[in-house]
Amino acid sequence: MDDFNPPTRLLMGAGPSNIHPRVANAMTAPLLGHLDPDFLGVMDDVREMLREVFQTKNAATLPVSGTGTAGMEAALVNVLEPGDTFVIGTNGYFGERLAEIGRRCGAEVVTVEHPMGSPVDPDAVKARVASLKRVKAVAVVHAETSTGVLTPLEPLAAIAHEAGALLVVDAVTSLAGVEFRADAWGVDVCYSGTQKCIGAPPGLSPITLSERAIEVMRARKTKVQSFYLDLTMLQDYWAQRVYHHTAPVSMIYALREALRLVLEEGLEARWARHAHSAAALYAGLGAMGLAIVAPEGHRVPSLTAVRSPDGVPEADVRKYLFAHHGIEISGGLSELAGKVWRVGLMGHNSTVSNVLTFLSGLENALAGQGFEVAAGAGVAAAQRSVRADLA
Amino acid sequence: MDDFNPPTRLLMGAGPSNIHPRVANAMTAPLLGHLDPDFLGVMDDVREMLREVFQTKNAATLPVSGTGTAGMEAALVNVLEPGDTFVIGTNGYFGERLAEIGRRCGAEVVTVEHPMGSPVDPDAVKARVASLKRVKAVAVVHAETSTGVLTPLEPLAAIAHEAGALLVVDAVTSLAGVEFRADAWGVDVCYSGTQKCIGAPPGLSPITLSERAIEVMRARKTKVQSFYLDLTMLQDYWAQRVYHHTAPVSMIYALREALRLVLEEGLEARWARHAHSAAALYAGLGAMGLAIVAPEGHRVPSLTAVRSPDGVPEADVRKYLFAHHGIEISGGLSELAGKVWRVGLMGHNSTVSNVLTFLSGLENALAGQGFEVAAGAGVAAAQRSVRADLA
């Protein structure tokens, strides 16, 4: 087996995203035992910084030892019991995944379906919740990674709490890239991933649980069906040092360093940076005559789904960008497969420089498909957006 | 939050173990997207090398994106359905964990209990299996990490297959450190961990499934209760590139490099190295008048549980080794808590040099507790063992 020397790519898809060199270096630090006092200090640091990033005081805040989907499953499997009613406002691929996992928990899953590209409508969710006898949890994807649509959370928290239900939120693509306030908004269970706006490699899923969620877990009549994702045991490990599993030590080093970078920058400054580079991207795409899937006011700055113009084979454009510019973007999922590109501007990668590089490459790729735009129009518009934004 | 500069420890507990610098460096390689052709190549490399390490031709061989406990749960949750009868030969902490996870799968769990420190007796398992109507799976821990006891697998495979059941094996502490032959021995489902004899950081759990196990999964009447650990979907991702979750890219780089090191050394040479350093450890402990928990002929070379002598506070000895020699060893679990030390010689760390360092430190620690041994007796006996072994 040969040495492995992976090429350097500009990762502008749905994640992972390129990481800061400090995060990469952190993984090479000497391993510690998972119960070593120095490692316990690292665990405490990570929990404290995660609380800041989630904007919560929740004691039960920790990284699950798996990727975002493990976090999603942990969120549901700890809260739902067989027969519970679970309402999801779905507007894309990851909402569907929540429904699928809810069914595997034995819950009665009720989906309030929205077209891909629309935010979740609180009135529709409210009506559906009101029609049901007893709802255990309401879930929504804050930033739908399949469409780049942002759904406001406060109205949904009010609806859930009025019905005596928990609000479960997927913040995989939003956390640390766009305003997020777990406590102020009334979020009960929220999970994310490390490889998006947090800026670490994939492999961990930060999760936080409100006191209300903890009460629901305490009142369970059945054991959590997953031992690995049993959050009561995980919290005992993270808070009381009771052995549960061997933490992925190097990944937790990486997360610690990534969180330090987030907080050194400052959360609000980081949100502003993501908004700033996203605005440049929107301006450039608009100038090139390309349509963004998400409506204005509901756009996720870290992930933009763009419609591939009629007659342009979307996969060929991605291949061109990849082959000639070393840029990775993602294709569409579900009914948007073959119809959109998904462009990520996440964490360390959310920069104007990357926007300009991408728009320039995209213009070349489109020209190769006979879709001509005025030379440099996208880049020029992005540049003007930057100037206006800085003014 | 400060810079983190963890101290260098000699990790001689139950894992994680220190890793080769090449493995640490591999994690700093540029991230690739989880569907990048170069990353798909890495995935293929890892699968091919894992097959070699498991000594199997099983197509369904891959690393689960979680630690050893995730592998344990994946093994059971894919095979067991509610109401299935599941027999476990238990002889320690991790056998009990198999039982607990089996119950969470809704299985009827039948434990064939053995004292901690004994291997699992095939006759006892055979009698119990024969008394049951229909057994879906029989499980055993190959190398019980709580006691350092090795249980031969071939007799148990014969018993399971005769009853039409699968043999599920926990090889977390044995794989790549002691002879293991999945195909030749008739193992149907086997999982391991990366942080023990494989020599990578914790975070992944290699798993392999025989055709017999795949047939059982295909014949399921119910969906696998875990989406994250659904091995049919995971195999589709690893073999057919169907998106399931974002693989922990950096960890998989580390695993690839660790597996390269395993195969560069050669499996049989690696097993021999583990046996060689373990023999030195046994000789040293014996000369110091200390008793090993596992009987001769059933010892795991990568993990040795040693009885703490009467009157010696076992935790104080561990603290001394840690504070004054930077050596981490583990304490006991379950009924052996407070009674034993667990000493790991795993992967990169399984060297005579580490044995001598540990024995020397242990002698100092014991002397501090008033347990005097002839000065240097342990080290001298280890040295003689090495010479005899090399002769």
Image (spheres, coloured by chain):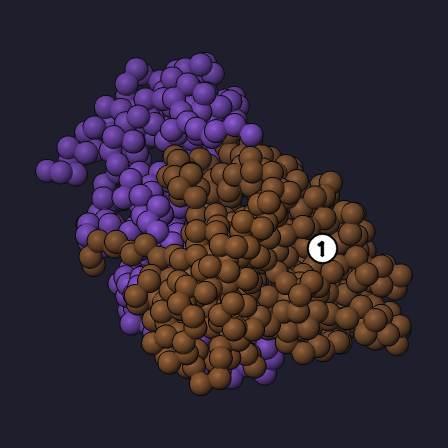
Chain colours: A purple, B brown
- In the displayed structure, A50 sits above or below A283; it is below
Q: Amino acid at mark 1?
A: Val
Q: For this view, does B207 lie left or right of residue A312?
A: right
Chain letter belonging to callout 1:
B
Q: Position of residue A182 (x, y in %)?
A: 33, 66
Q: Position of residue A75 (x, y in %)?
A: 49, 65
The reply to whether residue A312 is visible in this rendering is: yes
Q: Quadrant of the N terminus of chain B?
A: bottom left
Q: Position of residue B188 (x, y in %)?
A: 75, 54
The front one of A119 and B232 is: B232
Instruction: Name, please, the residue furthest toward the front.
Output: B374
The front one of A349 and B362 is: B362
Q: Quadrant of residue B49?
A: top right
Q: Quadrant of residue A364?
A: top left
Q: Position of residue A205 (x, y in %)?
A: 43, 57
Callout 1: helix, strand or loop?
strand
Q: Quadrant of residue B41?
A: top right
Q: Quadrant of the C terminus of chain B?
A: top right
Residue at 73 percent of width and 70 percent of height:
B120
Residue at 79 percent of width and 52 percent of height:
B186
Q: For this view, does B362 lie left or right of residue B170?
A: left
Residue at 43 percent of width and 81 percent of height:
B312
Residue at 44 percent of width and 35 percent of height:
B32
Reading the image, the residue beneath label 1 is B189
- In the displayed structure, A123 sits above or below B53; it is below
- In the displayed structure, A17 sits above or below A250; it is above
Q: Is the residue marked by circle 1 packed among few (<14), some (14-19), or many (20+) residues within 10 Å?
A: many
